[in-house]
Image (tube, grey):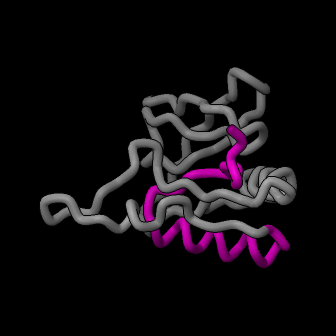
Amino acid sequence: MQRDFELVCTAPSIGEADIIVAWLERGGVRAHVKDRHMAGTLTWGTPAIAPRGIEIVAAPEDSERASTLWAERLRSDTTKLQQPGEAETVDAECEECGAKSSFPSASRGRVENCPACGDYMDVPSE
């Protein structure tokens, strides 16, 4: 079964996911937040958070452009869409394609998607 939309990246919050979607759309990519209804659900009074973050997906015909734009953004953006006070980043290398990426320090010890190939990659905890 083929998915209608393909994963571009993940975001730690719905607000950051919306910013990424708007930025991708300005770049000519049809993108949206996957399962928005789950991202805003309250569980016992606290927002539910997806284990791997909130997924941003793009139309299949736009997925290559979206991945390229996102990889360029990660290489050139020094803030990496972080919250105020989170200036540190952690570097990781994808075991699948060898691409080196930087993630916000809040991603330490998490599994993220490689901006270059989309495969899962481990972000070092230290």
Residue 17 is at least partly visible in this image: yes
| Residue nearer the viewer, 84 or 122 | 122
* Residue at the spot 61% in from the left edge and 37% down from the top edge: 91
Q: Quadrant of the C terminus?
A: top left
Q: Based on the displayed image, in which of its 4 quarters is residue 61 positioned?
A: bottom right
Residue 62: x percent and y percent? Answer: 84, 59
* Residue at the spot 55% in from the left edge and 54% down from the top edge: 55
* Residue at the spot 59% in from the left edge and 73% down from the top edge: 19
* Residue at the spot 56% in from the left edge and 52% down from the top edge: 10
101 vs 75: above or below: above
- Magenta region includes residue 8: yes
123 vs 85: above or below: above
| Residue nearer the viewer, 62 or 91 | 62
Q: Quadrant of the N terminus?
A: top right
Residue 101: x percent and y percent? Answer: 69, 40
Residue 11: x percent and y percent? Answer: 52, 57
The residue segment tinted magenta is 1-29
Considering every residue shown, the one lying at the far top of the view is 95
Considering every residue shown, the one lying at the far front of the view is 1
- Magenta region includes residue 3: yes
125 vs 14: above or below: above
Residue 111: x percent and y percent? Answer: 50, 34
Residue 87 is at least partly visible in this image: no
Left or right: where 9 falls relative to 100? left
Q: Tally the numbered discs.
A: 0
Left or right: where 13 falls relative to 19? left
